[in-house]
Amino acid sequence: MADPSPFCWWTPAGIAIGRMDEIEDGTARVYEIELSERRFRGLIARRGERLFGFVDRCPHAAVPLTRSATDDPIDNGLIQCCWHGARFEMESGYCVSGPCQGRSLSPWPIAVKGDRIVTA
Ligand code: FES
């Protein structure tokens, strides 16, 4: 049976996402990528010169972590889901508190080439 969801949960390698300077140190940004008939939504968190990519889907209720793609979900160094307050480590996506404590965000493989961020 075909999956009727308009979303997909992975991206092929080599898609241009954005630039490193679009994400301030200590913040995160949501990116939406159109893939033929489906849409992918990922979150990239930055700490110093390191970036961490995750699928923007909370393991508690399988919804995006933010109400809007322009919201920064970082609070006191942790990624926080806006719906019920689950809090995740920026580096690992591990949930340290909230209704899905002990679970993790799904990693989104990304790479930096020069100042460009691409899917990996
Ligand atoms: S949907 Fe994220 S904490 Fe409930």
Image (cartoon, rainbow, N blue to C red):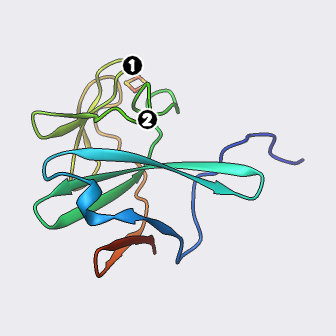
Residue 93 image label: none
Q: Earlier in the sequence, mark 1 or mark 2?
A: 2
User: In terms of depth relative to the viewer, which is nearer, 90 or 94?
Assistant: 90
Residue shown at 33% from the left, 46% from the top: 29
- Rendered position, 110 above or below 69: below
User: In terms of depth relative to the viewer, which is nearer, 21 or 99?
Assistant: 21
Q: Position of residue 115 (x, y in %)?
A: 28, 74
Q: Position of residue 58 (x, y in %)?
A: 43, 35
- Rendered position, 113 above or below 57: below
Q: Amino acid at mark 1?
A: Trp
**Which picture quadrant has residue 71?**
top left
Residue shown at 47% from the left, 33% from the top: 64
The CA distance from mark 1 to mark 2 is 9 Å
**Whether label 1 touches label 2, CB < 8 Å:** yes
Specify whether tag 1 is near ligand 1 (CB below 8 Å). yes
**Label 2 residue SS:** loop
State left or right for residue 71 relative to residue 6: left
Q: Position of residue 16 (x, y in %)?
A: 49, 70
Specify whether tag 2 is near ligand 1 (CB below 8 Å). yes
Residue shown at 81% from the left, 40% from the top: 4
**Label 1 residue SS:** loop
Q: Residues within 10 Å of mark 1 (few under 14, many from 20)?
A: some
Say which residue label 2 marks: 58
Q: Position of residue 111 (x, y in %)?
A: 36, 74
Q: Residues within 10 Å of mark 2 (few under 14, many from 20)?
A: many
Dividing the image into four equal quarters, which quarter contains ligand 1? top left
Q: Amino acid at mark 2?
A: Cys
User: In terms of depth relative to the viewer, which is nearer, 18 or 104?
Assistant: 18
Residue 83 image label: 1
Residue shown at 28% from the left, 34% from the top: 73
